[in-house]
Amino acid sequence: MSETKDISREAGELFRSAADFSLEDVRPQRLRYHLLRLTVAGLTKEDVKDLGELSRLAFQESDVTEQATRIKQRPEASSLAFAIADILERAGNAVRGPVSLKAVMFGAVLGAYTSLGGGRDADQSAAAIFGAIGGAVAMSTHTVILDNVNRKSWAEYLHLQD
């Protein structure tokens, strides 16, 4: 069985594990705990500090460009920190529609949780990055999609025929 098929057979369990970690880390009511959890996916203490500042700016819907650039130019920044910074920078500058930087940040951080509990150390950083991308897309576009669907109908949206 290929590795892709193995992962597909574990998708529900990986979802449950990531969701459990996310819900556990929200109890202290500090984003810091989400970022600290991601140290197992490659974030360093410096990354946590820098991403904390990026988060503060994103939650204020402020310009994140300078902080994102700072993270991306730091030679020892982890791949995951670089990816989250790049996602936020692009969301602030080059997306076709209005997106909430707060939603993008939440999505990127929580999406990176998909790498937790999978037991594939070599691929954990890559899985965290792909999860961050997917989470950022899902969180930042869901409101627009829901608003659009609510203006028409769910039956029309769910219709699979042209």
Image: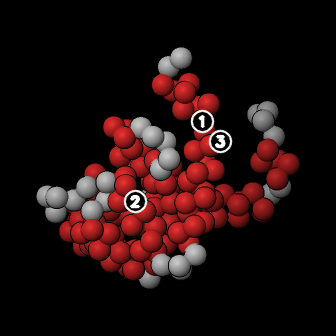
Q: Quadrant of residue 50?
A: bottom left
Q: What is the number of the mark on residue 10? A: 1
Mark toward the start of the polypeptide (2 vs 1): 1
Q: Amino acid at mark 3?
A: Gly
Alpha-carbon neighbours of circle 1 within 10 Å: few (<14), some, or many (≥20)? few
* Element on which disc 2 rests: helix
- The residue at which mark 2 appears reads as 38
Residue in the image at 85% along x and 48% along y: 155
* Element on which disc 1 rests: helix
- The residue at which mark 3 appears reads as 12
State left or right for residue 89 relative to residue 23: left
Q: CA gap, disc 2 to disc 1?
A: 20 Å
Which residue of the protein is positioned furthest toward the right in this rendering?
A: 155
- Residue 41 % position (x, y): 37, 52
Residue in the image at 32% along x and 69% along y: 48
**Of 121 and 105, which appears nearest the observer?**
121
Mark toward the start of the polypeptide (2 vs 3): 3
Residue 103 seen from this side: no
Vertical side of 74 occupied by 26: above or below:
below
Label 3 near label 1: C-beta < 8 Å? yes
The total number of labels drawn is 3
